[in-house]
Image (spheres, helix red, strand yellow):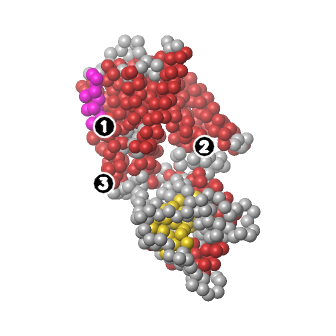
Amino acid sequence: MLTPDQFLLGVALIVLIAVGCQIAASRLRIPALILLLPAGFTAGALTDVVHPDKLAPGNFSSIVSLSVAVILYDAGLGLRLAHLRGAIRSVVLRLLFLGVLASWASVTALAPSLLGVPFPVALLLGAVLVVSGPTVVGPLLDHVRPPDRVRRILIWEGTLVDPVGAILGALVLHSLLSGDFRVGRGFHPGEFMLSWLVGLAGGAVGAAVLWFLLRRLRLGETLGTLAQLATVVAVSAGCDIVRDDTGLIAAVVAGLAVANLPGLGMPARRPFFETLVQLIIGLLFVTISAGVAPSSVLPVLLPALGLVGALVLVVRPLVAWISTHGHGLPRGERLFIAWMAPRGIVAASTASAFASTLDGEGLPGTDAILPVTFLVIVGTVLVYGLTAAPVAARLGITLPTRARPLLVGGRPWSVDLARCLKSAGLDVTVWTATEEQRQRVRHAGIEPAPGELLTAATDPSGRLEGVTSVLLLTDDDDFNALVSVVAQDSVDGPVHRVGPPPHGPGAVATRTGPDVLFGPGLGRDVLADRHGRGARFTVGVPGECPPPGHDALFVLGADGRLEPVTESRPARPGPEDRVVLLGPAPGGPPA
């Protein structure tokens, strides 16, 4: 039992390690788990104050369960049913079914010979290791930037397989404690369905409560976030009380329902929730790995590495190749899916909870579950984390690093600007409101964006995948101003708008601000007038100063980035950067 001072020291160390590892990982551009797991393991070996059983004796597994429920709820909020259709849905379902069976069967078959554990323990270990996890897959995909289809398949698989593995593990654990694995005795197949029914019911209750709180009461961002947190914790705890580990299902279902119910207006970016989830992930990995004794790792080190090799080199490629067969996916995408199945927080949490439950039962081989799971997590994260980017590059499926701006507006000057950016090598997308403007875009050699693209940009729960910035260039200044605020939650990049005329009729738009393009002297009226009188957009030579009479609008980096010039950020090109310029009007009547 820790003293109050030791408890405070332990909590402080865990928080510092968790946050410090994530900061360091972001600087090193590697998955945080690569640092979190060894850091927690080292801290646990050097001191007792971070050991989970001493920080929360007897209750650590319950704390872990509720924490993982919050993580999975957040993952569910990122799932859009509109993306789960056609080939993607079929591949995800196959990966879930075949992946769970193959991983479970292979670990169960290999563990007795590799680890020397009895068959019931091997069966439990196999159930623990079927999971993947969005908390590991998501950061890896953000770093690799594969095509949207590959990303959706892997995120859906990683999110849905977590509660499946947790439920399987709980059922096998109960069978292990009962000492009977015969079908119809200790392990009822119907219990799996009963657990899912309890989880689905809890998820439905949670979704209904959140719909009332967020839709009917219209809670703001702060109270809405608190309401979500309280609801998820309450529903998950209630389900776990009724039936073990069903709270994870309820959390995923609640998040999935809230993300897809109409009218809730869930923002795609949830700063507080994302911060909370990142902190929880760090704290859990540090404390769980701190609970792994070095003396328990050494005897199973080589056998666990053999198990990692079988899962990475045989099981996952075979499952992925069968699951993606006949769905029209390119060979490179199929191979990358076959090279992405890291284990994550749910495997660690279930193994920790099971180890705590089995402690003192005297069952042979159960003391290997936690260290083997720890080593499998470390091994798969290291393999995939260090090789995902080069493998994706070798397969040719990494999205280009160059900017992909979305230009909103179909006036002649904005279409000419889009053509100039495209000629500079950018993947430009243009959205326009009328058929006449769409024809103008096509004549410029650019395919107009589909109508639903702007809908996604203005939908608080949507996400513009692949778009790196939005440039609002319409004649409606209030529209530009309002969309520049709403679309911030839907774009992985900046949103800028053209400045209104000095004495325009807009009731909302302002002429200044960090999101206004080109500074106060280049509003849309000036741009349209100069373009109508013959001024043209051009791209300068790298390292060359703009000629007299030319105004700098964008800086095109040598690495493909696009940086708009604003009042607060003037053009500062590097020696290899180019500048997009608006030349002087040669004369003639105004447009």
Under tag 3, what secondary structure? helix
Q: CA distance from mark 2 to mark 3?
A: 38 Å
Residue 333 in view, yes or no: yes
Name the image quarter holding residue 292: top left
Marks 1 and 3: CB-CB under 8 Å? no
Say what amino acid the circle numbered 1 marks.
Answer: Leu
Q: Which residue is mark 3?
A: 394
Q: Nearer the viewer, residue 513 or 275?
A: 513
Nearest to N terminus: mark 1 or mark 3: 1
Q: Nearer the viewer, mark 2 or mark 3?
A: 3
Q: Label 2 belongs to which residue?
A: 258
Q: Which mark is residue 366?
A: none
Given residues 23 and 215, the one toward you in this image is: 23
Q: Residue at x 54, y 28 (%)?
A: 66
Q: What secondary structure is marked by label 2?
A: helix
Q: At x 40% / y 30%, what residue is drawn?
A: 39
What amino acid type should be assigned to the residue bearing mark 3? Arg
On whether residue 105 falls in the magenta region, the answer is no
Of mark 1 and mark 2, the one earlier in the sequence is: 2
Image quarter in which the C terminus is found: bottom right
Residue located beneath label 1 in the image: 311
Q: Position of residue 570 (x, y in %)?
A: 55, 63
Q: Determine the main secondary structure of the stretch shown in magenta.
A: helix
Q: Is residue 118 left or right of residue 256?
A: left
In the image, which is nearer the foreground, mark 1 or mark 3?
3
Magenta-highlighted residues: 298-310
